[in-house]
Amino acid sequence: MRRMLRTLCLAAIFSPCAAFADDREQGIATLWEVLWHQSGTPTRVVRWEGDIRVRIFGIDLPAHREHTLQALRAVTSEAGIRLIDVSDQPDAQKLANLNVEIRADNALEDMQPCVTFLDFKTETRIDSATVQMRSRDAWRCAYHEAMHVMGVRGHPAGKTVLSYFPWKVDGLLPLDKVMLRAWYSPRMVAGMTPFESLPVLADELVATMPDRAAATQVRDRFFSSTIEQMHAYADGKGDIPVVVKRSGKATEDGIRFGRSEMSFFLGVAYQEGATVGTDPGQAVRWFERAASAGNRRAQARLGAFR
Protein backbone atom coordinates (compact mmCIF):
# COMPACT_ATOMS: atom_id res chain seq x y z
CA MET A 1 0.00 0.00 0.00
CA ARG A 2 2.89 2.34 0.66
CA ARG A 3 3.84 2.21 -3.03
CA MET A 4 0.55 3.66 -4.27
CA LEU A 5 0.80 6.69 -6.52
CA ARG A 6 0.81 10.08 -4.87
CA THR A 7 -2.30 11.03 -6.85
CA LEU A 8 -4.19 8.33 -4.97
CA CYS A 9 -3.20 9.96 -1.69
CA LEU A 10 -4.94 13.13 -2.83
CA ALA A 11 -7.99 11.33 -4.14
CA ALA A 12 -9.74 10.88 -0.82
CA ILE A 13 -9.34 12.04 2.75
CA PHE A 14 -9.29 8.50 4.07
CA SER A 15 -6.78 7.12 1.59
CA PRO A 16 -4.21 4.48 2.67
CA CYS A 17 -1.37 7.00 2.33
CA ALA A 18 -3.14 9.46 4.61
CA ALA A 19 -3.79 6.64 7.04
CA PHE A 20 -0.07 5.83 7.30
CA ALA A 21 0.76 9.48 8.02
CA ASP A 22 -2.04 9.66 10.57
CA ASP A 23 -0.76 6.51 12.28
CA ARG A 24 2.72 7.96 12.62
CA GLU A 25 1.56 11.30 13.95
CA GLN A 26 -1.10 9.87 16.22
CA GLY A 27 1.31 7.24 17.51
CA ILE A 28 3.94 9.75 18.60
CA ALA A 29 1.28 12.07 20.03
CA THR A 30 -0.06 9.14 22.05
CA LEU A 31 3.41 8.41 23.42
CA TRP A 32 3.71 12.05 24.50
CA GLU A 33 0.29 12.04 26.17
CA VAL A 34 1.11 8.90 28.14
CA LEU A 35 3.73 10.96 29.99
CA TRP A 36 1.00 13.12 31.58
CA HIS A 37 -0.84 12.18 34.75
CA GLN A 38 -4.61 12.63 34.75
CA SER A 39 -4.20 15.27 37.47
CA GLY A 40 -2.78 17.51 34.75
CA THR A 41 0.95 17.26 35.44
CA PRO A 42 3.75 15.78 33.34
CA THR A 43 5.36 12.78 35.00
CA ARG A 44 8.70 11.03 35.39
CA VAL A 45 9.40 7.41 34.52
CA VAL A 46 8.72 4.99 37.36
CA ARG A 47 9.05 1.22 36.97
CA TRP A 48 9.64 -2.10 38.70
CA GLU A 49 13.19 -3.25 39.29
CA GLY A 50 12.48 -6.82 40.41
CA ASP A 51 9.88 -9.58 40.40
CA ILE A 52 6.19 -8.78 40.78
CA ARG A 53 4.45 -11.03 43.28
CA VAL A 54 0.71 -10.71 42.74
CA ARG A 55 -2.14 -11.59 45.07
CA ILE A 56 -5.62 -11.61 43.50
CA PHE A 57 -8.48 -11.64 46.00
CA GLY A 58 -12.01 -10.41 46.57
CA ILE A 59 -15.37 -11.50 45.16
CA ASP A 60 -16.29 -13.52 42.04
CA LEU A 61 -12.72 -14.79 41.64
CA PRO A 62 -13.61 -17.77 39.38
CA ALA A 63 -15.01 -15.30 36.84
CA HIS A 64 -12.10 -12.87 36.88
CA ARG A 65 -8.88 -14.43 38.12
CA GLU A 66 -7.64 -15.99 34.88
CA HIS A 67 -8.42 -12.95 32.74
CA THR A 68 -6.70 -10.67 35.24
CA LEU A 69 -3.64 -12.91 35.28
CA GLN A 70 -3.67 -13.00 31.49
CA ALA A 71 -3.49 -9.20 31.38
CA LEU A 72 -0.68 -9.08 33.95
CA ARG A 73 1.25 -11.80 32.12
CA ALA A 74 0.95 -9.86 28.87
CA VAL A 75 2.40 -6.62 30.27
CA THR A 76 5.15 -8.24 32.33
CA SER A 77 6.19 -10.47 29.44
CA GLU A 78 6.51 -7.46 27.12
CA ALA A 79 8.50 -5.58 29.78
CA GLY A 80 10.73 -8.52 30.67
CA ILE A 81 9.61 -8.57 34.31
CA ARG A 82 8.92 -11.84 36.11
CA LEU A 83 5.36 -12.28 37.44
CA ILE A 84 4.71 -14.72 40.30
CA ASP A 85 1.15 -15.54 41.42
CA VAL A 86 1.20 -15.96 45.22
CA SER A 87 -2.58 -15.79 45.66
CA ASP A 88 -2.93 -19.35 46.98
CA GLN A 89 -0.02 -19.23 49.38
CA PRO A 90 -0.86 -19.02 53.13
CA ASP A 91 1.21 -15.88 53.62
CA ALA A 92 0.13 -14.24 50.35
CA GLN A 93 -0.67 -10.95 52.02
CA LYS A 94 2.91 -10.61 53.27
CA LEU A 95 4.55 -11.95 50.11
CA ALA A 96 2.66 -9.82 47.57
CA ASN A 97 3.97 -6.49 46.33
CA LEU A 98 0.99 -6.22 43.95
CA ASN A 99 -2.52 -6.64 45.38
CA VAL A 100 -5.46 -6.90 42.98
CA GLU A 101 -8.88 -6.75 44.62
CA ILE A 102 -12.15 -7.56 42.85
CA ARG A 103 -14.76 -5.48 44.63
CA ALA A 104 -18.55 -5.30 44.78
CA ASP A 105 -20.39 -3.54 41.96
CA ASN A 106 -21.41 -0.69 44.26
CA ALA A 107 -17.84 -0.04 45.41
CA LEU A 108 -15.62 2.80 44.18
CA GLU A 109 -16.95 5.97 42.59
CA ASP A 110 -19.63 5.86 39.89
CA MET A 111 -17.25 7.25 37.27
CA GLN A 112 -14.28 5.20 38.44
CA PRO A 113 -14.89 1.48 37.90
CA CYS A 114 -11.25 0.62 38.54
CA VAL A 115 -8.16 2.28 39.95
CA THR A 116 -4.44 1.63 40.47
CA PHE A 117 -2.29 3.05 43.26
CA LEU A 118 1.48 2.98 42.82
CA ASP A 119 3.65 3.23 45.92
CA PHE A 120 7.18 4.60 45.61
CA LYS A 121 9.44 6.47 47.99
CA THR A 122 11.10 8.35 45.16
CA GLU A 123 9.69 8.94 41.68
CA THR A 124 11.85 6.22 40.17
CA ARG A 125 11.25 2.69 41.49
CA ILE A 126 7.84 1.15 42.18
CA ASP A 127 7.90 -0.50 45.60
CA SER A 128 4.36 -1.90 45.55
CA ALA A 129 1.01 -1.40 43.87
CA THR A 130 -2.70 -1.91 44.54
CA VAL A 131 -5.46 -2.40 41.97
CA GLN A 132 -9.18 -2.26 42.71
CA MET A 133 -11.78 -3.27 40.12
CA ARG A 134 -15.54 -3.61 40.40
CA SER A 135 -16.70 -7.10 39.51
CA ARG A 136 -18.91 -6.02 36.63
CA ASP A 137 -16.07 -3.94 35.15
CA ALA A 138 -13.10 -6.22 35.82
CA TRP A 139 -13.04 -7.68 32.32
CA ARG A 140 -12.79 -4.31 30.56
CA CYS A 141 -10.47 -2.86 33.21
CA ALA A 142 -7.87 -5.64 33.41
CA TYR A 143 -5.52 -4.59 30.59
CA HIS A 144 -5.95 -0.87 31.29
CA GLU A 145 -4.96 -1.25 34.93
CA ALA A 146 -2.20 -3.74 34.09
CA MET A 147 -0.51 -1.00 32.04
CA HIS A 148 -0.78 1.38 35.01
CA VAL A 149 0.70 -1.30 37.26
CA MET A 150 3.84 -1.22 35.10
CA GLY A 151 4.26 2.51 35.77
CA VAL A 152 2.65 3.88 32.60
CA ARG A 153 0.33 6.42 34.18
CA GLY A 154 -1.17 8.46 31.35
CA HIS A 155 -4.57 8.28 29.63
CA PRO A 156 -3.83 9.13 25.99
CA ALA A 157 -6.47 9.33 23.27
CA GLY A 158 -4.75 7.06 20.74
CA LYS A 159 -5.04 3.37 19.95
CA THR A 160 -4.15 1.98 23.35
CA VAL A 161 -5.90 0.17 26.19
CA LEU A 162 -4.98 3.20 28.32
CA SER A 163 -7.50 5.38 26.49
CA TYR A 164 -10.63 6.39 28.40
CA PHE A 165 -12.47 4.85 25.44
CA PRO A 166 -10.44 1.69 24.87
CA TRP A 167 -10.12 0.21 21.40
CA LYS A 168 -9.75 -3.29 22.77
CA VAL A 169 -10.00 -4.84 26.21
CA ASP A 170 -8.97 -8.46 25.68
CA GLY A 171 -5.35 -7.89 24.71
CA LEU A 172 -2.58 -5.34 24.27
CA LEU A 173 -2.49 -3.18 21.16
CA PRO A 174 0.72 -2.50 19.17
CA LEU A 175 1.24 0.90 20.82
CA ASP A 176 0.91 -0.66 24.27
CA LYS A 177 3.70 -3.09 23.41
CA VAL A 178 5.85 -0.23 22.10
CA MET A 179 5.36 1.63 25.38
CA LEU A 180 6.29 -1.34 27.53
CA ARG A 181 9.35 -2.31 25.51
CA ALA A 182 10.64 1.25 25.63
CA TRP A 183 9.69 1.78 29.29
CA TYR A 184 11.76 -1.23 30.34
CA SER A 185 14.55 -0.92 27.76
CA PRO A 186 18.18 -0.29 28.80
CA ARG A 187 17.96 3.20 27.27
CA MET A 188 15.18 4.21 29.65
CA VAL A 189 16.37 5.20 33.11
CA ALA A 190 14.05 5.36 36.09
CA GLY A 191 13.31 8.96 37.00
CA MET A 192 13.69 10.29 33.45
CA THR A 193 11.77 13.47 32.66
CA PRO A 194 9.30 13.60 29.74
CA PHE A 195 11.80 15.13 27.31
CA GLU A 196 14.41 12.53 28.23
CA SER A 197 12.01 9.61 27.86
CA LEU A 198 10.07 10.78 24.78
CA PRO A 199 12.94 10.02 22.33
CA VAL A 200 13.23 6.49 23.75
CA LEU A 201 9.50 5.92 23.26
CA ALA A 202 9.47 7.53 19.81
CA ASP A 203 12.47 5.54 18.57
CA GLU A 204 10.79 2.31 19.62
CA LEU A 205 7.75 3.31 17.57
CA VAL A 206 9.81 4.39 14.56
CA ALA A 207 11.50 0.97 14.56
CA THR A 208 8.08 -0.65 13.95
CA MET A 209 7.21 1.51 10.94
CA PRO A 210 7.53 0.25 7.33
CA ASP A 211 9.07 3.55 6.19
CA ARG A 212 11.45 4.52 8.98
CA ALA A 213 12.83 7.55 7.16
CA ALA A 214 9.36 9.10 6.85
CA ALA A 215 8.54 8.16 10.44
CA THR A 216 11.76 9.83 11.62
CA GLN A 217 10.74 13.05 9.87
CA VAL A 218 7.34 12.93 11.57
CA ARG A 219 9.09 12.31 14.90
CA ASP A 220 11.41 15.32 14.46
CA ARG A 221 8.56 17.62 13.46
CA PHE A 222 6.60 16.48 16.49
CA PHE A 223 9.56 17.15 18.78
CA SER A 224 9.93 20.67 17.39
CA SER A 225 6.24 21.59 17.62
CA THR A 226 5.91 20.08 21.10
CA ILE A 227 8.87 22.01 22.45
CA GLU A 228 7.39 25.20 21.03
CA GLN A 229 4.00 24.46 22.60
CA MET A 230 5.56 23.65 25.97
CA HIS A 231 7.55 26.89 25.90
CA ALA A 232 4.26 28.77 25.70
CA TYR A 233 2.57 26.53 28.28
CA ALA A 234 5.38 26.86 30.82
CA ASP A 235 5.43 30.63 30.27
CA GLY A 236 1.74 30.74 31.18
CA LYS A 237 0.79 32.00 27.73
CA GLY A 238 -0.05 28.82 25.84
CA ASP A 239 -3.19 26.72 25.86
CA ILE A 240 -3.61 23.99 28.43
CA PRO A 241 -2.61 20.73 26.72
CA VAL A 242 -5.53 18.72 25.37
CA VAL A 243 -4.55 15.72 27.48
CA VAL A 244 -5.01 17.87 30.60
CA LYS A 245 -8.40 19.18 29.48
CA ARG A 246 -9.58 15.70 28.59
CA SER A 247 -8.82 14.26 32.01
CA GLY A 248 -11.41 16.46 33.69
CA LYS A 249 -9.45 16.13 36.94
CA ALA A 250 -6.98 18.98 36.66
CA THR A 251 -7.39 21.82 39.17
CA GLU A 252 -6.05 25.36 38.93
CA ASP A 253 -3.40 24.48 41.51
CA GLY A 254 -2.53 21.34 39.56
CA ILE A 255 -2.13 23.28 36.33
CA ARG A 256 0.00 25.89 38.09
CA PHE A 257 2.21 23.11 39.44
CA GLY A 258 2.27 21.51 35.99
CA ARG A 259 3.58 24.73 34.44
CA SER A 260 6.32 24.88 37.07
CA GLU A 261 7.25 21.24 36.46
CA MET A 262 7.30 21.84 32.71
CA SER A 263 9.70 24.77 33.22
CA PHE A 264 12.02 22.44 35.13
CA PHE A 265 11.68 19.70 32.53
CA LEU A 266 12.52 22.17 29.76
CA GLY A 267 15.61 23.19 31.69
CA VAL A 268 16.68 19.54 31.93
CA ALA A 269 16.00 19.08 28.21
CA TYR A 270 18.30 21.95 27.25
CA GLN A 271 20.93 21.01 29.80
CA GLU A 272 21.05 17.35 28.73
CA GLY A 273 20.27 17.81 25.04
CA ALA A 274 17.15 15.66 25.31
CA THR A 275 14.59 16.10 22.49
CA VAL A 276 16.34 19.43 21.73
CA GLY A 277 19.96 20.44 21.22
CA THR A 278 22.07 21.38 24.23
CA ASP A 279 21.67 25.07 25.07
CA PRO A 280 23.02 26.26 28.47
CA GLY A 281 21.40 29.66 28.08
CA GLN A 282 17.96 28.18 27.60
CA ALA A 283 18.58 25.71 30.42
CA VAL A 284 19.35 28.56 32.84
CA ARG A 285 16.30 30.48 31.67
CA TRP A 286 13.92 27.63 32.40
CA PHE A 287 15.59 26.59 35.63
CA GLU A 288 15.33 30.18 36.87
CA ARG A 289 11.65 30.27 36.00
CA ALA A 290 11.01 26.99 37.83
CA ALA A 291 13.17 28.06 40.78
CA SER A 292 11.23 31.30 41.13
CA ALA A 293 8.10 29.15 41.56
CA GLY A 294 9.78 27.28 44.41
CA ASN A 295 11.08 24.24 42.51
CA ARG A 296 14.01 23.02 44.63
CA ARG A 297 15.35 20.70 41.96
CA ALA A 298 15.64 23.67 39.62
CA GLN A 299 17.41 25.64 42.33
CA ALA A 300 19.91 22.80 42.74
CA ARG A 301 20.48 22.54 38.98
CA LEU A 302 21.24 26.24 38.75
CA GLY A 303 24.24 25.62 40.95
CA ALA A 304 25.86 23.71 38.09
CA PHE A 305 26.02 26.91 36.04
CA ARG A 306 27.73 28.99 38.70
Image: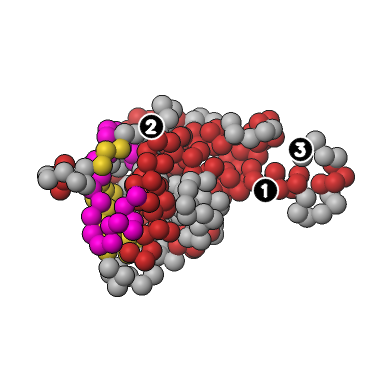
State how far apart marks 1 and 3 are (Cα): 13 Å
Q: Which labelled disc corresponds to residue 80? A: 2
Q: Which residue is mark 1?
A: 22
- Residue at 77%, 39% in the rendered image: 1
Residue type indicated by callout 2:
Gly
Answer with mark 2 or mark 3, whichever residue precedes in sequence. 3
Mark 3 burial class by Cα count in 10 Å: few <14, some 14-19, many 20+: few
Q: Is residue 197 magenta?
A: no
Q: Secondary structure at mark 1?
A: helix
Q: Secondary structure at mark 2?
A: loop
Q: Nearer the viewer, residue 145 or 68?
A: 68
- Residue 14: percent from left, percent from top: 75, 54
Answer with mark 1 or mark 3, whichever residue precedes in sequence. 3
Answer with mark 1 or mark 2, whichever residue precedes in sequence. 1
Apparent side of residue 226 relative to residue 172 in the rendered image (left or right): right
Instruction: State which mark lies toward you, 1 or 2.
Output: 2
- Residue at 75%, 46% in the rendered image: 16
Apparent side of residue 122 relative to residue 150 in the rendered image (left or right): left
Are the residues tagged 1 and 2 within 8 Å (C-beta)? no
- Residue 206: percent from left, percent from top: 60, 34
The region drawn magenta spans: 41-66
* Residue that lies at the very extreme toward the front in this rendered image: 62
Residue type indicated by callout 3:
Arg
Q: Nearer the viewer, residue 54 or 217?
A: 54
Q: Which labelled disc corresponds to residue 2? A: 3
